[in-house]
Image: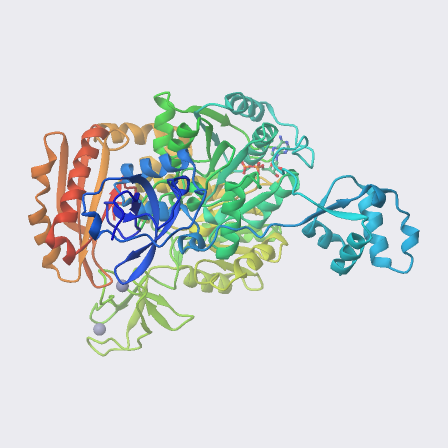
Amino acid sequence: MTDDRAWILKVAVPIGRRRLFDYLAPEGTEPAALQPGARVRVPFGNSSKIAFLIAVSFDSEVDRAKLKSAEAILDVPSLLNATDIELLLWTARYYHHPLGEVFSTAFPVTLRRGKPALIQAEQYFGLTPEGRTANPDLLMRAPRQQCLLAWFQTQPGSFSTGQIAGQHDNWRPAVKALLARQWLEPRPPPDRIVTAMPVRTPELQANASQQTAIDAVTQALGGFRVFLLEGVTGSGKTEVYMQIIRSVLERGQQVLVLLPEITLTPQLQERFRQRFAVPVTVAHSKLTDKQRQAAWLEMQQGVCAILLGTRSALFTPLKKPGLIILDEEHDASFKQQEGFRFSARDVAVARGKMLQIPVLLGSATPSLESYYNVEIGRYQWLHLPERAGDAQPPNLHLLDIRNKRMQEGLSQPLITQIHRTLDKQEQVLLFLNRRGFAPTLICHACAWIARCSRCDANLVIHYAEDLLRCHHCGFEQGLLRHCPACKSGQLTPLGLGTERIEQVLTQLFPGKTVVRLDRDSTQRKGQLESYLEQIQQGRADIILGTQMLAKGHHFPNVTLVVLLDVDSGLFSIDFHGTEKLAQLIVQVSGRAGRAQKRGQVILQTRQPDHPLLAVLLRDSYRRFLQLALAERKAAHLPPYSFQALLRVEAAIAQEPLTFFANLDAPALAGGQVQILGPVSAPMARKAGRYRYQMLFQSAQRRPLHLFLDALTARIENLKQSRKIRWSLDVDPVDLY
Ligand code: ADP
Ligand code: ZN
Ligand code: ZN
């Protein structure tokens, strides 16, 4: 028997489908308990799943008698408020991604799995009136109690168990005893956001351009506006953030600060914690699930005022939102590249608009999109043209290596420069974006090349581990000594990786300490931190590394920065390639001479006349952006048009093509959406799967999105879709 007046729950189940599912409300559910956003445990297939309540209704397209009952509603009240839900609905629609997965992304893993939404709250204690006047001398025989009582008496207010534990050993029995004497009493947790004195340590005296930026954003608090703060590394952006945050805190509001994973260093957290008297919490991938849940709930409940987090922290509910900051806004890590492919930058701007709060984007090398938004007046540009303090900008030189004698990638003039720098007891930083020993193993006798059997890619030589490894699928095999084709012993490494450069550096500069930072050398937990410390303390002469070096870290004693090979980045097939290379050059350059010493940057190239390099060196990054924008405009590329990429892959080569034939995208496109493809992906085979893609482009956003609605609906209904894997990438930044 089903009650035909029972509520029907429309829930989003995180299973990759774009439709909602109907369930009957659990028996005895009060209408007040039915709040959108609440987690609901529902039977699904042979098990149960955690789904999200989207709406309630009396109607269902399915016969009531066939509907199952939800097992339980987990959140009363819901953990999401109306604007949180609005944001997730908007994001799902914009990226044409299944709602259940979008909701799931917004929650920390523990809550996704249905764990109760509890924070282990700290207990607080304060003195009773008797305790305040009690004489500690009475406790001569209980020194710990005496000490604790005296400590409490020196300052007003209440203290948490954490604060007490920080100052007193074995404090539990002492607290218990003082409670028994009724000198101490439990107190409710103070409202930790609203505080008259949010700043603990004095702020630096802002310079004129910093002050202009601070004033502009501070005056915009309470409404929506997007700012782009452009400032080279060391120009004092973080200081600007912190002074603006102070004003937000004074309004009793919270701040969300998003950073790329790698720049969320303990030093930065420490800087925030030292500055602010309010609680600062962090959310990144190295935390335990429990810690991440705590950070999420602390923001949701308004216990915590500042969250420093990476991309996925974007969806954290905020009780009293005041400001969103996104630092290094150009960084590729803000775009999720698998599953739910959202851009944290773009969604942050949408969120700011919904919440009617400002969004502050910061970078030394703003993205082309953000710069474009400044040009058309949508974002307000703020600029810090100089390095804060007295640090000097670095000098950039192109080093033409054509016809120069090279020792494993190092030209003679470069080696001389390195010697000079080391002789002055200064540090050298070398950048090469390729790990391993060499990217190719080739037979000198017959030209056989070691290829991955599962990808269209060469295997990379890792000598130290005696391995050949595929950097695309992780395939590994032992290093070969003889050519499998002609049996000769003439296998030769071709090209350069960090491991090989490390070896040659050790030979060229005997007695000098070389530290290599790449994904291989920093795999063990804590290894990166210990290398960074070694560098900071001056116990490294030469620092060699990949991408990892480009961001965030301060190396004050580095005065020479070298990009060993910029040419490989100049000829990318992806139109985003030049932008990324320009950003990389400027970012890596920013590592040099951050303190009082003027830095030098050397770029080794065989293309000294390349227009991109010329503009960067003779002119500025800004001038580069202007030229790049003009090129994009002429070619009708984003941001002057809108794109979406449909990726399809299957283990059987024919399946994707059959899929595209059945899909018949052109029939859905109408006149305003252009279709390019299907074509093989630039890496046509990866991990044993054949990959194809189809690019959609339109001069307007709206027709593209209407088309994508129709397209995704059609794909979900096609039988052939089950034989392939597909994904849709709206505003793709990587066309691979
Ligand atoms: P960014 O975030 O742009 O790299 P930071 O805010 O970290 O720059 O500032 C770089 C260095 O300059 C830091 O050591 C900081 O303490 C210092 N600094 C920033 N602003 C000022 C200022 N107004 N006066 C003096 N030093 C400053
Ligand atoms: Zn051979
Ligand atoms: Zn592979």
Above/below status of 655 relative to 587: below
**Depth order, front residue of 431/452:** 452
**Depth order, front residue of 42/437:** 42
Residue 342 in percent (x, y) is at 33, 42
Residue 669 in percent (x, y) is at 11, 35
Residue at 19 percent across and 38 percent down: it is 709
Above/below status of 404 relative to 507: above
Among the 4 quarters of the image, the one containing residue 584: top left
**Depth order, front residue of 282/151:** 151
**Depth order, front residue of 477/601:** 477
Residue 504 shown left or right of residue 209 in the figure? left
Residue 722 in percent (x, y) is at 15, 56
User: How many numbered discs sit on the rendered protein?
Assistant: 0
- In this picture the colour scheme is rainbow
Residue 616 in percent (x, y) is at 40, 34
Asked whether residue 619 is in view, the answer is: no
Among the 4 quarters of the image, the one containing residue 701: top left
Residue 168 shown left or right of residue 296 in the figure? right
Above/below status of 152 relative to 636: below
Residue 627 shown left or right of residue 654 in the figure? right
- Judged from the image, the quadrant occupied by ligand 2 is bottom left
Asked whether residue 555 is in view, the answer is: yes
